[in-house]
Image (cartoon, rainbow, N blue to C red):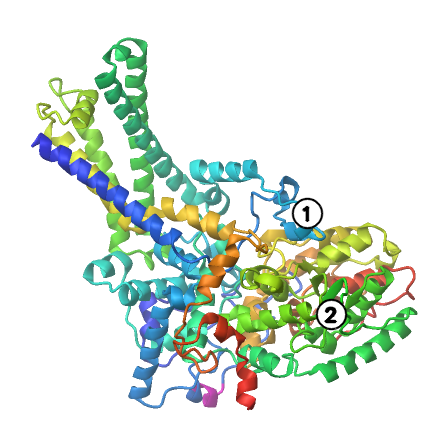
Amino acid sequence: MTILLYGTIYAALAAFLAACLARAVLYARAPLHLRWELYPVPHEETRRAEHGGSYFEELDWWIKPAQFNLLGELKAMAAEIVFLKGLWEFNRKLWWRSFPFHFGLYLLIAAVLLLLLSALLLIIAPGWMVGALGTSLHWLYTLTGLAGAGLAVMGALGLLYRRLTDQQLKTYTTPGDILNLAFFIVTIGVLAAGYLFRGPAAPSTLTVAVGLVSFDSSVEIPGLLAAGLVLGALLAAYIPLTHMSHFIAKYFTYHSVRWDDKPYLRGGNLGQKMAEYLTYRPTWAAPHIQADGKKTWAEVVMINPAQRVKK
Amino acid sequence: MTKKVKLDDMSRRDREPLIHLDHEELMRLPPPLDDPSEDRAFSPLSAQVREKYECSLDDTCAVSVPQPKTKEEEEELVKKFLSGLDKLFTRENNWTFLQPLLLTMEHCARCQTCSQACHIFEASGNNELYRPTYRSEILRRLYFKHVKGGGLVSAWQHGQITLNWPLVARLIELAYRCNLCRRCAQTCPIGADNGLVAHELRKLFSQEMGIAAKELHDSGSMLQLKVGSSTGMNSVVVKDNLEFIDEDTSEKTGLEVKTPWDVEGAEVLLIHNAGEILAWPENPGAFAVILTAAGIKWTLSSELAGYDSINYGVWYDDAQFARVALKHAEAARKLRVKKIVLGECGHAHKALSVIADRILTGDLNIPRESSMTLLRDIVMNGRIKLDPARNDFPVTLHDPCNLVRLMGVVEPQREIVRKICPQFREMEPHGVDNYCCGGGSGFAIMSGHNFPDWRFQVAGRKKIEQILNAFSDCLDPSIPKYLCAPCSNCKGQFRDMLAYYGLWENQRILYGGLVELIVNAMTDVKPGFIEWEWR
């Protein structure tokens, strides 16, 4: 049974990574779209970024050296990723539910990584885990995990309550939305219960983690904890199949759309991409487009439909 | 109270509008427009219009889609819609916006954060039909069901939808209940873009079904491609008009101005929105005064579309958009100018400077600059002499969405008004957080049936609130006030909307451009360039 559990966890992890990768590749390989940025753009020069300005505010901007304010962009990203700054600014009521949920998940992920680090250290260099380092790591992943679980469940319950009671959300709520939140609540709840009520004879979390890393089938994992681990694995595999994979999408919505203000410069690689797209053959059927599936975009846009009608 | 609409109401087969607008439910306006019982009544659509066109969304009709006469015709239209829907998600047909569209379809969390950012939703009294996500959710469900081939699991996860002609007909109208200002997108925590959804729907209807608002297509981009301007002016007429404007401006200012045409190698190719030439001739006149006084070598072009910066395709059709943008760039290339400077027209700024940037390859990629930037350089560097005392009246500044939120030109125009208008006051909010004038995305030129009622009472309502608040300390008909709107479409909306609410007649709120304020303050010019007359 233990091996089956390990197998499920590894399979789910593989499914999670594969689905995330597939989604990221889908977006990354989409053609470079026309510019559609939205200001403020935080990598603008600091003075301009403060009021949401762009390089278009500079006289003869194309002969001035391009400035990329990496620090500004990193600061905006950190505030958004860690603190959900956008939600804080524009939907405070939701932030009080969404922030604990997301921050709780971050803590849970951190706890899992710390646990795995401890397990690896115990296997590779067991001596290191004796003493202060081992104790510190133990307390760190335990407290981080418990705090994360508490915050995430609290946030998810708040989000679920709002979904079920707020009139403005009801029209747009599908059974899938309810399942998504319920899945988190049940999974984290069962995991936490499995941990807290595991009994004195049960193996420690570190032992379970070592067993998972080393495929040790002798570890006897209590039923409730095992159920929590299976649910966690299934949840991980499920997330990238849904809109909840916005942790991938957000990279593109921000960096490739909202903040993508890169100008076309002669000789740059944008020209090569555009040259490729202009060879595509559209099939739009409206008469004024005059796309017959044979003409390329380059040919279609050189047609003047008004003057053709005149003839 | 109108019953709250649901998503499946879009497929209702009866021909009754889904909602009726009631003044009591609309957002309250500040004084002196704070009594809803004194609001102008919404003109009802005539029985003939209701009989002839698809008007089953709300109390107005923007696109005038003829009703299909037979069931077969309806089915054919639905088939066309489905075919267009598929194309919207293929790289061959929609490489231009595929990535942002996919991201928006796949990742909206339906948290409704965007709703409160939408001026139309707020002004309507939070009417569900105008919620930014309502339109998007319809498209999203159609996408999962018909493009991704959804089944039971998909319907369970993404929601049900019934596709039929009534839904398509209502969706056509609903695509024209958004100003494409993208204020909603600015607030989305995920980065989903409901403005883009309206844009893409309009494209689908135009590019596949040949359906678009006639003001944008027939008398918009098609007319521009035919004669050179959506105003109907060909190059001979536009030159005649400019000659008249030159004479008039010279007489009025005491400075000799002559608009140069087709000057090869000029430093600046200035492209106006040709609507200025007909509706607000003082604007191109003021540009001529400033550029001449500043010693700039500039020119206009008489090439097809080279003298009219409008590009309505940016609101509804990628092919039409690209065709016009290429004509603008071609005009500049022929004259071998150093840069194109866009006059006071927001959508023309965004269209040519931002959206067209990647399709203007090779030697067509001639630098484009905002007139705001050039004017700031002229004003702030003392290239013309100015006396702010000449502008000593209350002035507020409208931020055209295309220029500010969508292009990042925020400060140049502010630096100018701060310098030359002692009584300048900001609207709140302003800059990149501004509200649309309500005429965005083509609405300013759309006046069919009773659409202006909707445009002024719903789409423009938030802006009216902002204007009244900005002038709340001087709402006195004896004090002339100036609403500076450096954008032709916004000015078109203000012209009609201020008149609709009687705000010129009763409160002396005049609208105009930025260059008029500059010339009004020029010491070398006879005083009184701004005439305080309604036009």
Q: Is residue A29 left or right of residue B311?
A: left
Front label number (2 vs 1): 1
Is B432 rendered above or below residue A123? below
The segment highlighted magenta reads: B46-50
Q: CA distance from mark 2 to mark 1?
A: 49 Å
Circle 1 sits on which residue?
Answer: A64
Amino acid type, callout 2: Asn
Q: Nearer the viewer, residue B348 or B427?
A: B348
Judged left or right of residue B399, residue A305 is: left
Q: Which secondary structure is most common in the magenta stretch?
A: helix
- Mark 1 neighbour class, 10 Å CA radius: few under 14, some 14 to 19, many 20 or more: few
Instruction: Name the residue: 58% across, 62% down.
Output: B362
Dot label at residue B506: 2
Residue under the image location 25 percent in, 39 percent down: A185
The answer for which chain carries disc 1 is: A
Locate the C terminus of chain A by quadrant: bottom right
Residue B278 placement (x, y as % from top left) = 73, 78
Q: Nearer the viewer, residue B72 or B314?
A: B314
Q: Is residue B20 left or right of residue B444?
A: left
Q: Going by the picture, which residue comes out furthest to the front?
A: A267
